[in-house]
């Protein structure tokens, strides 16, 4: 999930006949975006750079996990665990058709520090990226105490 170099199309499509093609099927990729204002038109080349979130891969002597509450109360960490950051409970995103992706709710990737209705930018093999109206993000909602079971 943290590639050393950015490309709007960082993967190949290969079939059973051992033929591989790059961006030949109207392929697209999704990237966690920054808090930059959403552009009016698709961006390309160097103009993409401010919209793509950065990452770093680190090693730690212990596990990291996210804890969600589905209430306005920030959940506590388990006993003897230290909090690393607080955020918003992100579940998944979808795009045109039936495509979508998410991660385990125990993953730190499910706790985003910033709430944005569009936390992902969609990039295409033709070298452009944009926020499209057919893309939806899904967040855990608050469940009122009287509605719980």
Image: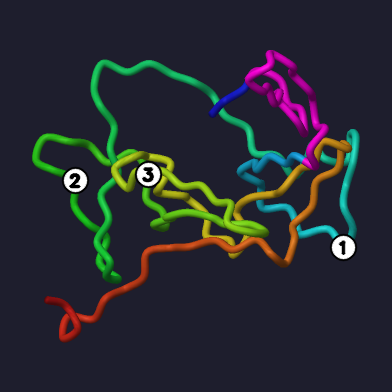
Q: Hey, which quadrant is residue 149 in on the image?
A: bottom left
Residue at the extreme left: 79
Instruction: Return the residue nearer the eye: 20 or 106.
Output: 20
**Would you identify the image quadrant in which residue 58 lies?**
top left
Label 1 vs label 3: CA separation?
A: 32 Å
Residue at disc 1, secondary structure: loop
Residue that mark 2 sits on: 77
Residue 109 place in picture, x, y as percent:
43, 41
Of helix, strand and loop, which one carries label 2? loop
Instruction: Point out residue 99 in the picture as x, y percentages from the top left corner.
Output: 58, 52
Distance from label 2 to label 1 (Cα)? Answer: 41 Å
Magenta span includes 5: yes
Q: Residue at x 71, y 23 (%)?
A: 12
User: Of the residues under marks 1 and 3, which one precedes in the sequence?
Assistant: 1
The magenta stretch spans which residues?
4-26
Judged by depth in the image, the label closer to the viewer, 1 or 3, is 1
Q: Is residue 13 above or below residue 78?
A: above
In the image, 50 versus 138, the foreground residue is 138
Residue holding disc 3: 85
For this view, does 2 lie left or right of residue 7? left
The residue at the point 46 percent across, 50 percent down is 112
């Amino acid at each position: 999930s943290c590639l050393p170099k950015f490309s709007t199309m960082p993967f190949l499509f290969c079939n059973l006949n051992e033929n591989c093609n790059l961006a030949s099927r109207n392929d697209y990729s999704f990237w966690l975006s920054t808090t930059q204002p959403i552009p009016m038109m698709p961006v390309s080349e160097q103009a993409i750079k401010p919209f793509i979130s950065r990452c770093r891969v680190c090693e730690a002597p212990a596990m990291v996990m996210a804890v969600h509450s589905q209430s306005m109360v920030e959940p506590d960490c388990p006993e003897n665990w230290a909090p690393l950051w607080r955020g918003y409970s992100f579940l998944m995103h979808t795009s045109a058709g039936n495509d979508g992706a998410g991660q385990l709710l125990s993953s730190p990737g499910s706790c985003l520090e910033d709430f944005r209705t569009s936390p992902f930018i969609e990039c295409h093999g033709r070298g452009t990226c944009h926020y499209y109206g057919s893309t939806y993000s899904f967040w855990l909602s608050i469940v009122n105490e009287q509605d719980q079971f």
